[in-house]
Image (cartoon, rainbow, N blue to C red):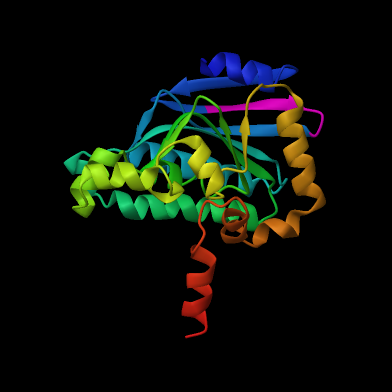
Amino acid sequence: MQTKTILEQLFPNKLEYHIDNSMIRGSAETNMGNVEIIGTVDSAAMNQLIAMTLANEILAVIEKGEKTPIVFIVDTMGQDSSRADELLCLNRTFAHLASCVDLLRRRGHPNLAIVLGEAVSGGFLSYGLMANQVFAMQSSQVKVMDLNAMSRVTKIPLDKLKSLSQTSAIFAPGVENYYAMGAVDDIWQTLDEHLVENALESQLTHMDDFFTDNRRQVAKDRKGRLLCDEIVQSVLTA
């Protein structure tokens, strides 16, 4: 489904945006008031330019001091693998972007991320996964890396990874597995104008709840990470 079609279904009242260098910036009107739209489209390869631009846009919204909600649009194939970006310390730039999202949250801005297409690796982690809530389209692709790449990095045979992915969500790509692991709050089957409004209303009512990361417990309840919480507690009490 095209970005334009999705956004028009989510924001039928008033919607303005522009796309430049695989980045989207705009605003929309909801029954909860105005929201700012910031993110990536067209399976963007996250590089220095995109990461710094997104960070600057977030800081500009914070600077206004109006606690305007932000809707992050996520469609990224992951970090740009160019040598230039690596030499410019893209990992540190990603950390800066993540810190800007964290500052936004701490300043009381309701915010959520919507995965429209791909959500891969550092491109997703640096801003989408940092949001108060993450929602994904049923057709979206969420993953750290595909199993072939994972096999090369971990030296675990591909057949073994494929076998593990059938029973363990942490080894398997796919939006359903990330829902099971607590990384995605909900998978949207159909779209309407109330989805974003309901999420923002919930955040405004219980804003303090989003300062506590309960994804370990959520993943345990959804049977996506059965040992994570137990291991963390063992480490903390060791």
In the image, taking residue 181 as reference, residue 168 lies left or right, namely left
Decide which of 101, 53 is in the foreground and name it: 101
x, y (%) of residue 137?
Answer: 56, 28
x, y (%) of residue 128?
Answer: 51, 42
Residue found 51% across the figure and 15% down from its top: 2
In the image, taking residue 231 as reference, residue 209 lies left or right, namely right
In the image, taking residue 21 as reference, residue 57 lies left or right, namely right
Magenta span of residues: 25-32
The prevailing secondary structure element of the residues shown in magenta is: strand
Residue found 24% across the figure and 42% down from its top: 159
The number of numbered discs placed on residues in the rendered structure image is 0
Asked whether 30 falls inside the magenta stretch, the response is yes
Residue 204 in sight from this viewpoint: yes
x, y (%) of residue 52?
Answer: 41, 43
x, y (%) of residue 94?
Answer: 39, 50
Residue found 22% across the figure and 46% down from its top: 151
Asked whether 222 falls inside the magenta stretch, the response is no
Residue farthest bottom in this picture: 238
Decide which of 234, 89 is in the foreground and name it: 234
Q: Is residue 230 above or below residue 125?
A: below
Decide which of 222, 87 is in the foreground and name it: 222
